[in-house]
Amino acid sequence: MTKFADLKSKEILELVLKQMKTAGTSFMTAWVKRGMPKKITGKPYASINLFHLWAKAEQMNYVSNTWATANHINTLKNELGQKGLINKGEKATWVVGTFTKPEKKTLVRGADKGKTVERDRWFTKFYPVFNLDQTNLKEKDLPITGANTIGSVEDYVKNTGAKVKVSSDSWNPFLSESCFYNVSQDFISMVDKSKFKSTQESSATQNYYSVLLHELTHWTMHKDRCDRSFVEETKTKDGKPDPKASYAMEELVAEMGSAIQSCKLGITSKPKLESAQYLNIWISRLENDSNLFWKVASYASKAVWFLESKQPKKVAFNKNKLFAKKYA
């Protein structure tokens, strides 16, 4: 990783950690209310960029969800027919992109040993973008794109094929066994929707679906889906497994995955109360290992990608693809 990329990576993590420390487990609730950060084409950001732009918009109190490069902004015109321009004194926010370029390589083994072939080499690099609020443009000046909707929550969950068992037990928000993903038997256990209560921020129905999407993200950890684990990343200094830390990071993936899905489905995301017990572990682990946040963000986006691949309007899913490696 270059010094510049390393500097920008640390800036992203510091911004997220600051909001995590200030707002506690509700740090993503404010993000979700803002809507999905998206490109000028209407395509939403993913992985590290999604969470970075959410945090940046919250920090700067931007109203728009649209971000674009200076070149893209310059290709547009506002309602007065003026060329799209960045307002004087505005500073860019840096995002990371994945690109390819052809590379010649000589094969060193196999039947074609010694043969020179041309292949695409994947690499990542940071590039600057600006929020639409930093320009002389408005949302109405942008090209009209199709609505990014993924239907009702019930249909969305049903289409994934996840087995959801509804318990008749009373919902106790302080008991983790109330709603959970059973790893060994591969099913999601939920308390009946009628047992959930409303809060100042969200309705009882929204709270139910927020928890369901949290557990649905856990469901993707199965080896036949996203095959996700934090055992290696959370070992103690003497190399021993730390089950609590490993599960804590999986909880962060589930919270992030739930936030992305809630935003796309128009639900007010509310963190599970049990997540509070993991907050200090999240902060401690991320402060000591900046690579870990990249992995968590990538895992959360990949989980949502997998779930969306099960919807009628399918997207191709590749379990082995990384959204953004931490190098440039």
Image: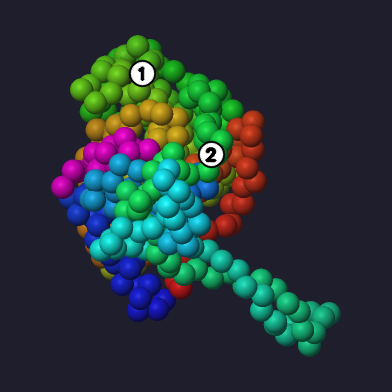
Q: Does residue 257 sit above or below 169 in this rendering? A: below
Picture disc at residue 99: none
Q: Are marks 2 and 1 in contact (CB under 8 Å)?
A: no
Residue 209 percent across, percent down from the top left? 39, 25
Q: Secondary structure at mark 1?
A: helix
Does the magenta run of residues contain 32? yes
Residue 240 percent across, percent down from the top left? 33, 62
- The total of numbered circles placed on residues is 2
Residue 69 percent across, percent down from the top left? 44, 60
Residue drawn at x 39%, y 43% as measured from the top left: 138
Give how far apart the Cα atoms at labels 2 and 1 are. 32 Å
Q: Quadrant of the N terminus?
A: bottom left
Residue drawn at x 60%, y 39% as measured from the top left: 309
Q: Residues within 10 Å of mark 2 (few under 14, many from 20)?
A: few
Looking at numbered disc 1 in the image, what kind of residue is underneath it?
Answer: Thr
Residue drawn at x 77%, y 84% as measured from the top left: 116
Magenta range is: 22-35
Picture disc at residue 205: 1
Residue drawn at x 24%, y 33% as measured from the top left: 273
Residue 136 percent across, percent down from the top left? 35, 51
Picture disc at residue 144: 2
Mark 2 and mark 1 lie on one chain; the one further toward the N terminus is 2
Asked whether residue 51 appears in the rendered view, the answer is no
Looking at numbered disc 2 in the image, what kind of residue is underneath it?
Answer: Ile
Picture quadrant of residue 166: top left
Q: Is residue 310 left or right of residue 15?
A: right
Q: Is residue 33 left or right of residue 75?
A: left
Q: Secondary structure at mark 2?
A: loop
